[in-house]
Amino acid sequence: MASTLSEWSSKPVTVLTCDGRLITGTLAGYDQLQNLILQHSYEKVYSMESPMERVELGLFVVRGDNVAVISDCGGEDDDDGEEDDVRAEPIQQIGGNR
């Protein structure tokens, strides 16, 4: 995992957390416990009642034990407005031994 994270340093990534949050930001740092530091981050909040909401977070730390999935954004430009009207069920908490 660490070799992949080093390739993604200073690049945009999206993190799905175990509690169902979808957070996107620039990977500023990480450690051996997979704690992540994201700059210029924001959370995408989905709901069936209203369009996707983008909540600005700024500098954000995600604890390694709360990381379910990390993905590079692959050069996606989230400012194109395509997701502005997306409605979806919120992501459920990922089960486990919590």
Image (spheres, helix red, strand yellow):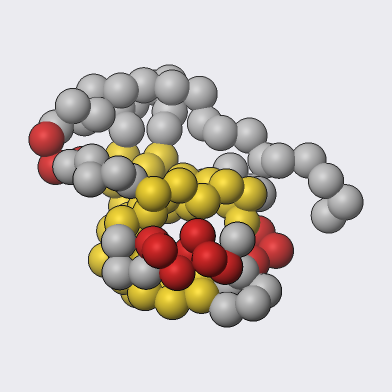
Q: Residue at x 40, y 40 (%)?
A: 45
Q: Residue at x 88, y 51 (%)?
A: 97
Q: Is residue 54 above or below residue 3?
A: above
Does residue 60 appear to the left or right of 81 in the view shown? right
Residue furthest right in the image: 97
Q: Is residue 69 above or below residue 5?
A: above
Q: Is residue 55 above or below residue 47?
A: below
Q: Residue at x 51, y 70 (%)?
A: 36
Residue furthest left in the image: 80
Does residue 4 appear to the left or right of 33 in the view shown? left
Numbered circles on residues, count: 0
Q: Quadrant of the N terminus?
A: bottom right
Does residue 82 appear to the left or right of 68 in the view shown? left
Q: Is residue 76 above or below residue 62?
A: above
Q: Nearest the camera: 42 or 1?
A: 1
Q: Nearest the camera: 41 or 28?
A: 28
Q: Quadrant of the C terminus?
A: bottom right
Residue 82 visible (yes or no): yes
- Quarter of the figure with residue 6: bottom left
Residue 10 rendering spot, x and y as whole percentages? 30, 69
Residue 57 visible (yes or no): no
Residue 13 rendering spot, x and y as whole percentages? 38, 54
Does residue 75 appear to the left or right of 33 in the view shown? left
Residue 59 rendering spot, x and y as whole percentages? 35, 74
Residue 90 rendering spot, x and y as whole percentages? 52, 31
